[in-house]
Image (spheres, helix red, strand yellow):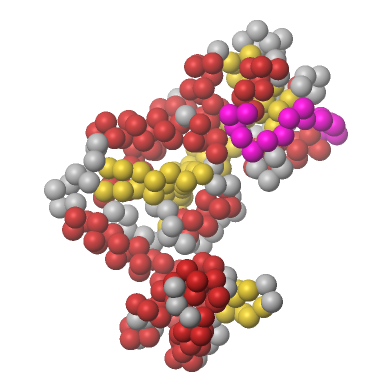
Amino acid sequence: MDKSASIPSKYLQDTTMRYFLEVVRSGSISEAASRLNVAASAVSRQISGLEDKLDTPLFERRKSGMIPTAAGELLAAYAFRNQLETEKVAKEIQELQGLQRGEIKLVCTAGFSLDFIPQVIASFREKYPHINFKLSIAVAEEVVRRIVEGECDVGVTFSQIPMENLHVAYRCSSPLMAVVPHHHQLAHKKRVTLNQLSGYPIAVPERHILTRRLFDACCSRQNLMIQPALETTSISSLLAFVRYANGVCISAHLVVKQYLKDHNLVAVPIVGVDINGLDIEINTLSGRTLPKAVSTFVEHLKFAMQAELN
């Protein structure tokens, strides 16, 4: 049952909910108190008082910190959404003249920050020059967390496990490619297999990055032992390795499309019975009514993705 729908509003006072949400974010009463610049005892009293009024525990107290219970997660989702709706109303009041001003908080995984997202921001600001952006770079799981907890408005990442509070505003598939210099032996092939790549120095993302996990899984299924010459979290370093070491790197096509043109590189599709492209998603918070600037940008971003993949 959705208890949040019937919670008396007097229990959800600004101070109580600010303290509660800060404990959810930080996972610790002492850390929340430090961020709020209040005594830890004050935070503890607010949390205990809220649990008494709702007659249910909101956190599991562990040595590792404060872990929200199912009721705590439900209340946090409700509170985050209300917080964002309040911000949205304030922004809309300020933007009565249309998209004359505003700020969009965007988060994406590293590859999209190379060229694609900056290009989309630039083209959007040509139409709406007074809309400003805050762009954060994070791993895929962190992108999802920042959207669900209301820290960012829009997320761009590769598909993750579906989450209840995450809305997929748009999804598209981008093929997996082998990126090589234009003079490389593989550059003129229409397609390559993983086995064909095994004889060349190869640069790959580190293991926590989705592209690498897909690459490793495909190699495992084909009993291929490919020892990377370079592992890194930096997409720029992967591509620089291709240029300077006559090597190969693995990437989704959308991520590197413009970079290929600018640096005379070639992307060759990787094929095989178990090789699939990566699904790219635009994510927002489920159930949230987006501010006008954000919803307009999401549509602009969708159009840009469609244009790049055609």
Which quadrant of the structure image shows residue 63? bottom right
Residue 135 vs 232, above or below: the answer is below
Would residue 32 be visible to someone looking at this image?
Answer: yes
* Horizontal relation, residue 258 to residue 85: left or right: right
- Between 257 and 159, the one lying in front of the other is 257
Residue at 60% across, 32% down? 235
| Residue 181 within the segment the image draws in magenta | no
Q: Is the stretch drawn in magenta largely helix, strand or loop?
A: loop
Which quadrant of the structure image shows residue 129? top left
* Horizontal relation, residue 237 to residue 259: left or right: right
The location of residue 240, given as percent across then percent down, is 62, 23
Would residue 51 be visible to someone looking at this image?
Answer: no
- Between 39 and 9, the one lying in front of the other is 39
* Horizontal relation, residue 214 to residue 89: left or right: right
- Between 305 and 204, the one lying in front of the other is 204
The location of residue 171, given as percent across then percent down, is 48, 42
Residue at 43% across, 60% down? 150
Residue at 70% across, 15% down? 246
| Residue found at the very far left of the displayed protein | 97
The location of residue 226, given as percent across then percent down, is 81, 30
Query: Which contiguous range is marked in magenta?
Result: 222-237
